[in-house]
Image (cartoon, rainbow, N blue to C red):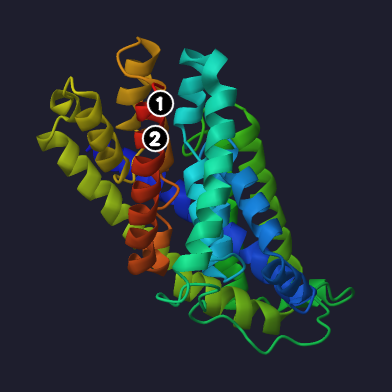
Amino acid sequence: MEALIEIIEHTIMISAFVFVIMLVIEYINVLTSGSWQERLMSNRWAQYLIAALLGATPGCLGAFMVVAMYSHRLLSLGALVTAMIATSGDESFVMLAMIPEDVIVVIGALVIIGVVSGIITDLFVKNKHNTYFQKCDGLIEDIPEHCNCYPKGEIISQWMNCSSSRGILAIMVSIIIFLFLSGEIGPEEWNWIRITILITMGISFFIIATVPDHFLEEHLWEHVAKRHLPRIFLWTLGAFIVLHLSAEHFHLEGLIRESSWLTMLFAGITGLIPESGPHMIFITMYAKGIIPLSILIVSSIVQDGHGMLPLLAHSRRDFFLVKIINLIFGLIVGSIALFLGY
């Protein structure tokens, strides 16, 4: 029961954050008549840079933001690959504590490898797989040239005649904000992650409270809340349950072998698991001098913490495709590094 409660808490946190990010993206997209989306889509270098920087931030929030932007076809498949290679999820904090002298080297290497891998992915994969700027199901294409997203003088009347969708969204976000403030979900201590989440939640509540009824019904309720949120929640919950049951029956630590090449392969395969825990094995082994840097890099390239879980709700094909691409790049880079003696 305790494990189930923890799984539900993690699922709510991830779903809530991705949900509010989608709300903000939808708001900005309509507010600017899609102009910022067009500029981002037309500048691939900006995509790789943004994805790499978001991925390199400690924790999974940056990765969640990249998935949300990818699902709204703001980023290419290569940019998604860049972010997932650059991210180390919650393990970033562990590396800061256990190997602080090597963190900058590892993260810097992941960013560079991520950008190069993303460029190669867009060059060779986009023609075989229609994933570059993949259309988001339900994305509103008919964006008005001008949207009065803050109808001054009408906000009070909108609440006096509050629609059910506005009321439900406002209550949902209010409850989520309370759960984060009370520490029931998310980080227990006040840190930049908790502050970032709460600021984003506050922005989303402002959007829900002020946008006109048409915007709220068409964009936030029908598209984000009804179409995306249930899939994100259910797929994330299902993935966590499967991971928990698998961990009960398979002990990854016992599968480590002394051979560096086999250990590297195992590190890459372990990285396919959308979970933070298994990567801890290789951080600990590296900190104790048991494995070389090359194996740690392989594990860091392939694994992405919980960052990829929301993608399951958007496209299972893309989820597995990115995982396979990252495994290939991880093994190539790791093999070269190990051959050179690192």
Which secondary structure lies at badge 1? loop
User: Residue 324 bears which disc, if any?
Assistant: none
Which secondary structure lies at badge 2? helix
Q: Which amino acid, mark 2? A: Ile
Q: According to the image, label 2 marks what residue? A: 336
* Callout 1 crowding tier (Cα within 10 Å): few <14, some 14–19, many ≥20: few
Q: Position of residue 165 (x, y in %)?
A: 57, 75
Instruction: Write the residue at 23% across / 35% down.
Output: 266
Assign the C terminus to one quadrant of the image. top left
168 displayed left or right of 333: right
Q: Position of residue 18 (x, y in %)?
A: 53, 56
Q: Residue furthest top?
A: 288
Assign the N terminus to one quadrant of the image. top left
Q: Is residue 215 above or below residue 243?
A: below
* Callout 2 crowding tier (Cα within 10 Å): few <14, some 14–19, many ≥20: few
Query: Which quadrant holds residue 275?
Result: top left
Query: Which quadrant holds residue 157?
Result: bottom right
Q: Position of residue 67 (x, y in %)?
A: 51, 58
Q: Nearer the viewer, residue 139 or 335?
A: 335
Q: Is residue 327 above or below residue 126?
A: above
Instruction: Write the residue at 18% across / 19% down.
Output: 258
Q: According to the image, label 1 marks what residue? A: 340
Q: Nearer the viewer, residue 261 or 32?
A: 261
Residue 176 in sight: no
Tell me whether the residue at label 2 lies in contact with that at label 1, contact meaning CB atoms closer than 8 angstroms. yes
Instruction: Write the residue at 69% across / 58% down.
Output: 45
C-alpha span from label 2 to label 1: 6 Å
Instruction: Write the residue at 34% across / 41% down.
Output: 331
